[in-house]
Image: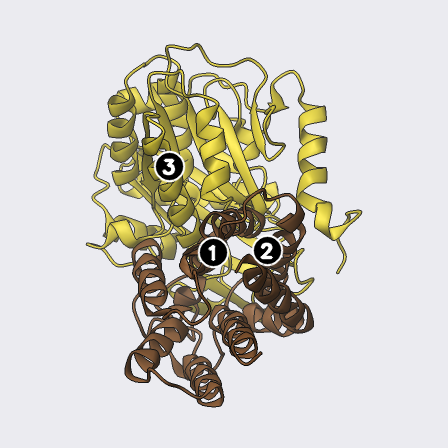
Chain colours: A brown, B yellow
């Protein structure tokens, strides 16, 4: 099972490697202009740590990965984005439901980030996915991907209520939240990889 | 981007290395992590150490304020990014034998999340650490919602006064109490006149026209009261002090400690002109001043502008404020 987690993290790393400049550009509008670089650094450290983490159980392995990312990234994005990585260690079988994992991720992001749905954050990706999966036990991967993309695009019109974007004159309206976009990329890689593995 | 460095990825590490080499009589790397800078000579084991974790790019704060009478350690994050809670915990652990530890947290989302996480992790390890969230920027939230305000230059009063008190006291709660009292008596308002370049992107941090100023901008370019046309120092100071005096009861006969902080590329000449106008304005209300701090301390790279902070002081605060400090970059 740990191989699945590794493969997903590697795929996410490659995806962000291709897209980090776009994420940085979006973050220039809303923050420091380094979100892409930061998440890329976090995933790079995560991939590099595969050989040094002496854990084979997903729950312990992913806890170490989460910590590695948190330290490498720092800031609000490091602490919030690493939550899902720790929670996904609870996925023991490929075909297990991830509703509880998503629910715990959402609860922890809300608590740590003092954030709610509609505040223009990564929560605006997690919550729609949770709601969709709760109502669609059997889903088509293409429909899920479309839902994730739509959720990210909706952040464009949202006013930021958290982070530095909250204090911008525009409150970030008109710009997609880079954290939501990077989260969507990582989650899409997760669902795609799970779909591939299940179809083998 | 016109900035001097070797490798973008090593900017923070190279800076810290230079700092520690330059001031090795007073500061050093901790043994556990080179992003944790501590005093060369540890504080007495029966006293409460004072720490903060913060993003870099705002020097000399906070790394430059490590020294006797000020900070015991600074956990240094990447540029404009708070260090992780895990790293802050490592900093707290260094002082686990002391009777208590005070972690200062400037009110910015990443700093708060990671600072609070570090305190929770410390509790799990039975380390007696508490945090004080610092805020003072009146442009970032209205009166009545003070706890939602950003941490600005006025947090300096807390660093210095608590730092001095921590050399005398072994009681964590009394430090917290004094810290809260100083915070509640401090108000800050800033003005931006030009943007610095971000070392991360190489781009300007915010946009502002040549004849414009921005009142209330935060240290990362966050907005506040809005844009105005550039005016004289006297008019600008009057506008800013009016807002500050409207926000808090500074009264006739009060003794305030002023802090005029430059944002990174504001000359001492300009800051002293501003201070002259502050004195003139306050004297009209019979508000007295005590040992002002004037220079560039909380910076955002080469940004132009300044902030005015006022602390309504009592005798104990003034005594602690003016007590000596060995921190390499704090000069009253």
Measuring 21% from the left and 37% from the top, which residue is drawn there?
B252
Q: Position of residue B139 (x, y in %)?
A: 35, 58
Write the residue at 61% across / 23% down.
Answer: B31
**Residue occupied by mark 2:** A42
Element at badge 3?
Answer: helix
Q: CA distance from mark 1 to mark 3?
A: 16 Å
The residue beneath circle 3 is B121
Sequence order check, earlier mark of 1 and 2: 2
Q: Chain of mark 3?
A: B
| Residue placed most toward the observer, A52 or B125 | A52
Q: CA distance from mark 2 to mark 3?
A: 21 Å
What residue is shown at x 42% (from left), y 17% (from top)? B323
Q: Position of residue B204 (x, y in %)?
A: 63, 64
A129 lies above or below A88: below
The residue under label 1 is A82
Classed neighbour count for the residue bearing mark 3: other residues with Cα under 10 Å, few (<14), some (14–19), many (≥20)? some
Residue sitting at the far front: A200
B265 versus B29 height, above or below:
below
Q: Crowdedness of circle 2 by 10 Å Cα count: few (<14), some, many (20+)?
A: many
Report whether residue A21 is seen: yes
What quarter of the picture does the C terminus of chain A occupy?
bottom right
* Quarter where residue B317 is shown: top left
| Labels 1 & 2 near each other (Cβ < 8 A) | yes
Q: CA distance from mark 1 to mark 2?
A: 9 Å
Left or right: residue B212 versus residue B251 is: right
- Mark 3 and mark 2 in contact (Cβ < 8 Å)? no
Residue B56: image quadrant is top right
Which residue is at the far right? B6
């Amino acid at each position: 099972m740990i191989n699945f987690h590794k493969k997903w993290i590697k795929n996410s790393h490659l995806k962000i490697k291709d897209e980090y400049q776009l994420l940085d550009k979006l973050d220039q509008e809303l923050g420091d202009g380094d979100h892409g670089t930061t998440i890329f650094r976090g995933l790079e450290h995560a991939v590099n740590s595969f050989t040094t983490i002496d854990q084979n159980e997903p729950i312990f392995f992913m806890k170490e990965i989460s910590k590695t990312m948190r330290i490498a990234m720092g800031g609000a994005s490091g602490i919030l984005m690493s939550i899902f990585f720790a929670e996904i260690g609870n996925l023991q079988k490929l075909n297990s439901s991830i509703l509880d994992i998503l629910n715990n991720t959402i609860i922890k992001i809300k608590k740590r980030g003092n954030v709610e749905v509609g505040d223009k954050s990564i929560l605006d990706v997690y919550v729609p996915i949770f709601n969709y999966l709760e109502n669609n036990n059997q889903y088509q991967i293409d429909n899920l991907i479309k839902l994730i993309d739509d959720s990210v695009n909706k952040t464009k019109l949202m006013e930021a209520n958290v982070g530095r974007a909250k204090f911008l004159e525009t409150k970030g309206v008109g710009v997609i939240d880079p954290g939501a976009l990077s989260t969507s990329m990582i989650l899409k890689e997760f669902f795609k990889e799970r779909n591939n593995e299940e179809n083998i | 981007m016109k900035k001097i460095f070797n490798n973008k990825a090593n900017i923070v590490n190279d800076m810290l290395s230079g700092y520690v080499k330059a001031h090795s009589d007073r500061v050093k790397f901790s043994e556990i992590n080179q992003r944790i800078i501590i005093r060369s000579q540890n504080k007495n084991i029966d006293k409460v150490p004072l720490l903060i974790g913060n993003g870099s790019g705002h020097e000399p704060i906070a790394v430059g304020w490590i020294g006797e009478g000020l900070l015991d350690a600074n956990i240094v994050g990447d540029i404009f990014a708070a260090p992780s809670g895990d790293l802050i915990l490592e900093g707290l652990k260094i002082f686990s034998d002391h009777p208590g530890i005070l972690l200062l947290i400037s009110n910015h989302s990443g700093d708060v999340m990671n600072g609070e996480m570090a305190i929770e992790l410390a509790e799990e390890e039975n380390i007696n650490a508490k945090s004080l969230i610092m805020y003072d920027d009146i442009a970032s939230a209205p009166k009545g919602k003070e706890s939602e305000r950003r941490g600005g230059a006025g947090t300096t009063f807390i660093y210095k006064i608590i730092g001095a008190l921590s050399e005398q006291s072994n009681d964590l709660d009394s430090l917290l109490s004094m810290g809260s009292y100083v915070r509640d008596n401090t108000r800050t308002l800033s003005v931006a006149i030009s943007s610095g370049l971000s070392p991360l992107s190489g781009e300007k941090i915010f946009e502002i026209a040549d004849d414009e100023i921005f009142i209330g901008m935060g240290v990362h370019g966050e907005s506040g009261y809005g844009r105005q046309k550039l005016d004289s120092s006297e008019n600008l100071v009057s506008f800013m002090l009016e807002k500050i005096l409207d926000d808090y009861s500074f009264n006739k006969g009060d003794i305030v400690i002023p802090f005029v902080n430059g944002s990174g590329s504001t000359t001492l000449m300009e800051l002293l002109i501003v201070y002259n106008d502050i004195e003139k304005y306050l004297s009209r209300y019979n508000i007295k001043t005590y040992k002002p701090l004037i220079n560039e301390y909380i910076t955002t790279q080469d940004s132009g502008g300044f902030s005015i902070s006022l602390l309504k002081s009592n005798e104990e605060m003034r005594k602690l404020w003016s007590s000596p400090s060995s921190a390499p970059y704090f000069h009253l």
